[in-house]
Amino acid sequence: MTRRDPTAHVERLRELSDQESFLEPISTLRRRTVIRYMNRLAPTASVNTKELARVCASIEQNEPLSTLARSDFRRSVQGLRQRDLTRLSIAGVLDTQGTDSIVRGERFELYADVLTAIDAKL
């Protein structure tokens, strides 16, 4: 009778963890929307939270920007400030030194390329 290695699953779990941590910055629609939007802008462009919130709300609600009222994108502002911009900043995708000056981070191009490749396959 051969003994089963009780740690055989550990390597697979380590690989999954690495993949999940790499994909975490693009795991939500709002974060993907931010990256896609900023990828359309000039590389040195900066945006503010409200601009990003309006774009995200437009996508999430499937409504044109011109029809959105302030109340329509309030939830997006809160989500961006409380979660999404922080996560993108920690991952190096964005540089969020101030909410009025959000720019591309050192890893922005990597994630923009990943989303472009995914979009090409869809």
Image (cartoon, helix red, strand yellow):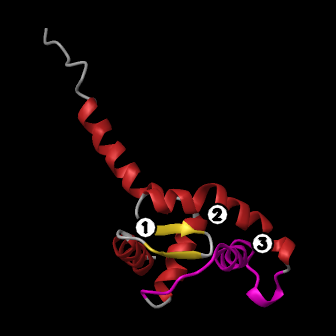
Q: Which residue position holds label 2? A: 80
Q: Categorize mark 2 by other alpha carbons within 10 Å: few (<14), some (14-19), many (20+).
A: many
Q: Position of residue 101 (x, y in %)?
A: 56, 76
Q: Is residue 47 magenta?
A: yes
Which of the numbered marks, if any, corresponds to residue 59?
Answer: none
Q: Nearer the viewer, residue 109 or 86?
A: 86
Q: How many marks?
A: 3
Disc 2 or 1, which lies upstream in sequence?
Answer: 2
Q: Which residue position holds label 3? A: 73
Q: Amino acid at mark 3?
A: Phe
**Up-down: is 83 above or below 67?**
above
Helix, strand, or loop for circle 3?
A: helix
The part of the chain drawn in magenta is: 43-68
Q: Which residue position holds label 1? A: 93
**Up-down: is 34 above or below 87?**
below
Q: Is residue 51 magenta?
A: yes
- How far, Cα to Cα, is label 3 from label 2? 11 Å
Residue 49 lies in what quarter of the image? bottom right
Disc 3 or 1, which lies upstream in sequence?
Answer: 3
Q: Categorize mark 3 by other alpha carbons within 10 Å: few (<14), some (14-19), many (20+).
A: many
Disc 3 or 2, which lies upstream in sequence?
Answer: 3
Residue 63 lies in what quarter of the image? bottom right
